[in-house]
């Protein structure tokens, strides 16, 4: 199976792995990162999460050839804290997130791609019932307009939403090609071929189907609390909405609380939880971009859990 892991070397280096590290790969995918992690933590433990059952099964076959000190959860990553607590794990040394859709998911006729004719699906977890079909055929015009603008940042969201509702009044919209044709019809050829609104609309529907941004907002505070002092949080994002959430949460947890700013001595309770390792995101190299054009929008951000006891000595 062809899979390219974006910013892999940079992510592995950022985790500061030791032989005994306990690490979470929150977005297992097809084990590109996890395989490299497992090679380096011979006396540690890897916990991996993915909502895609097929990815979990494939990755298990890959990882068992490397070692047996791992456990895979077929769960969305926002269930991380509960799953780890059930394993008796209350602290870890590193957590990796690689958001977005994997190359195999794009290539497996699951409705993520607007470049081929596929059934409207877009489910990362194939065991869930709710899919892109339900969004496109059942959401109100106002709701469609809202998600296209909010999650796709599409300027002509209202036109697309109106045309979808009009088209489905005659027949259900079943395929990605039908949806792309409706988008083209709604915005006109000049705008369509210049601005490519289908990218934005498909992104918005995918985010809605999988509740991606809600899960990111839920899991990052969990992840910070799970980190041991000195533990690293390593996050790769692929579009501005994901990156904005990561930046905001990193900022919130790396700054002194406004209530106590200016005090001669700040109580430990109000000290920051995180230290930002890279103020500017790490981007793919030219070499990586030449190998994999899908990595073009990737941004890597790294933060480290502060040892508050040391900062007060």
Image: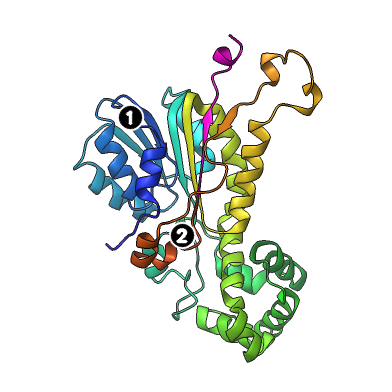
Counting from the top left corner in percent of width and height, residue 188 is at: 66, 89
The residue range painted magenta reads 300-313
Q: Nearer the viewer, residue 271 or 166?
A: 271
Q: In the image, is 219 to the left or to the right of 98?
A: right
Is tag 1's residue or tag 2's residue first in the polypeptide sequence? 1
On screen, residue 63 versus residue 297, left or right, reads left
Dot 1 surroundings within 10 Å: few (below 14), some, or many (20 or more)? many
Q: Please report the residue visible at 47 percent of the width from the left and 63 percent of the height from the top.
A: 296
Position of the C terminus, as image quadrant, is top right
Query: Would you place residue 282 above or below residue 307 in this image?
Result: below
Task: Give the number of the disc on residue 101.
Answer: 2
Q: In terms of image quadrants, where is residue 150?
A: bottom right
Residue 104 in the image: x percent, y percent? Answer: 36, 63
Please, which residue is most extreme toward the top here?
Answer: 313
Compared to residue 305, the image places residue 152 above or below, namely below
Note whether residue 222 is visible: yes
Tell me where residue 198 sits by quadrant: bottom right
Do we see residue 175 in this rendering?
A: no
Label 2 SS: loop
> Pointer 1: what residue?
45
């Amino acid at each position: 199976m062809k899979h390219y892991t974006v910013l892999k070397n940079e992510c592995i280096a950022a985790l500061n792995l030791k032989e005994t590290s306990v690490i979470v790969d929150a977005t297992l995918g097809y084990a590109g990162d996890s395989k490299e992690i497992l090679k380096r933590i011979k006396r540690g433990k890897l916990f991996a999460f993915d909502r895609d059952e097929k990815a979990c099964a494939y990755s298990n076959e890959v990882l068992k050839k490397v070692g047996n000190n791992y456990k895979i959860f077929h769960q969305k990553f926002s269930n991380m804290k509960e799953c780890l607590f059930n394993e008796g794990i209350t602290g870890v040394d590193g957590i990796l997130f690689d958001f977005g859709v994997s190359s195999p998911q794009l290539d497996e006729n699951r409705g993520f791609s607007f470049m081929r004719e596929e059934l409207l699906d877009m489910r990362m977890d194939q065991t869930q019932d709710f899919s892109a079909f339900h969004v496109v055929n059942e959401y109100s015009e106002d709701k469609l307009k809202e998600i296209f603008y909010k999650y796709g940042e599409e300027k002509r969201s209202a036109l697309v939403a109106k045309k979808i509702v009009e088209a489905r009044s005659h027949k259900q919209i079943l395929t990605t090609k039908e949806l792309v044709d409706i988008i083209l019809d709604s915005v006109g050829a000049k705008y369509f071929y210049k601005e490519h609104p289908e990218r934005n609309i498909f992104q918005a529907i995918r985010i809605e189907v999988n509740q991606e941004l809600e899960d990111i907002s839920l899991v990052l505070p969990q992840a910070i609390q799970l980190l041991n002092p000195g533990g690293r949080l390593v996050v790769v994002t692929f579009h501005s909405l994901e990156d904005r959430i990561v930046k905001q949460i990193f900022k919130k947890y790396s700054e002194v609380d406004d209530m106590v700013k200016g005090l001669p001595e700040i109580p430990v309770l109000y000290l920051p939880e995180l230290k930002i390792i890279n103020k500017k995101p790490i981007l793919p190299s030219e070499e990586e971009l030449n190998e994999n054009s899908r990595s073009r929008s990737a941004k890597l951000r790294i933060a480290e859990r502060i040892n508050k006891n040391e900062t007060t000595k």
